[in-house]
Amino acid sequence: MNPGAGDAFRKHADSFRINPPILRLHSIISLFKKDLLLELRQQYAFYGVMLYVASTVFVLYLAIEQPEAEIWNALFWVMQLFVCINAVAKSFLQESGGRMLYFHTIASPAEFVVAKLLYNLLLMALMNVLTLGLFMAFMGDPTYDLPTFVGISFLGAMGLSLVFTMLAAIASKAMQQASLMAILGFPVILPQLLLLMRLSKTAFAETFTDGISLQVVLLLALDLSVAILSVILFPFLWKD
Amino acid sequence: MRKTWWKILCVCLLVYAVVGGLLLPVPEIRQLQETIRNLYYHVCMWFAMMILFTTSVVYSIRHLRTLDIRYDIYAREFAAVGLILGLLGYATGAIWAAYTWADPNSPAYASFGSIVREPKLIGAAMAILVYFAYFVLRDSISDIDKKARVSAVYNIFAYAMLFPSIWIIPRLLPSLHPGQEGNPALNFNDIDARMRMVFYPAVIGWTLLGVWITSLRIRISLIKEKNWLNG
């Protein structure tokens, strides 16, 4: 590489460096509000996912009316996974190139991604309540300790929404976005899902109770690391 | 000589590992018998795979820091060779399992089912799937700079999510696979001194072979892509 090209290259590389990340609370809040407002105005997306949840639960009910605890648990987590992919996928896909350019002028990438993470957390928490309610209504309540299961399901929804937000950001840069997100996401989310399914067994019987706090801490640590990685890595996805 | 000594070392170590691995004495364990010699191939493949994947992530980070497209080529080739070693590790593991875990009294598919459900194998399968997904992602982006950047981000993210869980989760689930309490074969107590004499050289030898293959692949890629690399 000739020296002139090297200089141009370094300048180009410098434009990607944001050290340390800029995080202003008011921009995060306004970006978060913007997503919320868009959701409230164009409700088709929210209702679309809601309809998806309701019809899937109804199909499951028609297939197996009152499943046993273990099958109930498995179906619930599979459902959570697909709901999350559908709900979170659109968070980056809806932003057109021009709009991204506009956000670029008013906010830092870290603020943008933190707002998205928070918004998807809220969305997924809502979806979790909905899924759980419909599961209880249609397929019975096989849990032994309902509050614990609700807590674990929120923990799971949190982890899923954080991981898939970042994956949606990656997939939005490629072609075939929706199918790519599933390909990229499944191997990455599987360990966490495995841990969650195992953890939620504690809510169905009295037996498995050792090492729970360790697993909860592990899941929270994973969530935190996803958030930190998103803030560090998102700036590289943000510019074209 | 300055640049070739490690290739000579690699050949010597591998000749020693193959000949020594088949001929030197091994401890007699009833359920393993002579299949224990597979440790020199199976476990070494996984070690080499982990080392190559880690190297790939390091080059991805260097790519993001400098945006030099060469580092992206390095990261891609290390991941590709790591993937090949991973598949070889899977194959050697399957052969080993066929002689030790498979139940001769039940049909083949039943043993296969119980082997596939092993938590360690699930972890290994996930590692391989992540890198398949990495190559699918690469192929789905046409712009070269964008491809390099986005795939580097995925490489780092997936590695950071996957590897801690591969090391932690199998310890929480019951498994037939050895190494429940720590890192299998790294612990000084669970590997016999006679085996260590062959095992460590074999790990280094297979890793060096992986690096050698990768370096050749990198050189081919650099020649193929030199037109736009030097602009």
Image: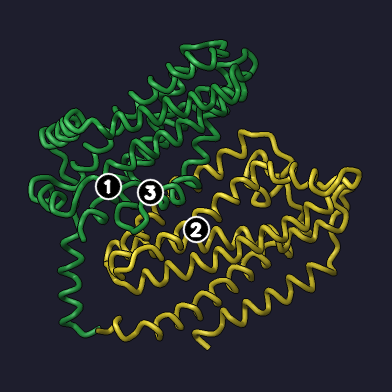
Looking at this view, is A169 or B36 the one in front? A169
Residue topped by disc 2: B131
Query: What residue type is disc 2 on?
Result: Tyr
Within 10 Å of disc 2 (Cα), the crowding (few <14, some 14-19, many 20+) is: many
The reply, left or right, for residue A138 in relation to residue A231 is right
What x and y, as percent, mark residue B11? 66, 79
**Secondary element at tag 1:** helix
Residue topped by disc 3: A178
**Secondary element at tag 3:** helix
Which hue belongs to chain A? Answer: green
Query: What residue type is disc 3 on?
Result: Ala
Q: Are marks 1 and 3 in contact (CB under 8 Å)?
A: yes
The reply, left or right, for residue B228 in relation to residue B16 is left
Residue topped by disc 1: A93
What is the C-alpha distance between the residues marked 1 and 3?
A: 9 Å
Query: What residue type is disc 1 on?
Result: Leu
Q: Which is more N-terminal, label 3 or label 1? A: 1
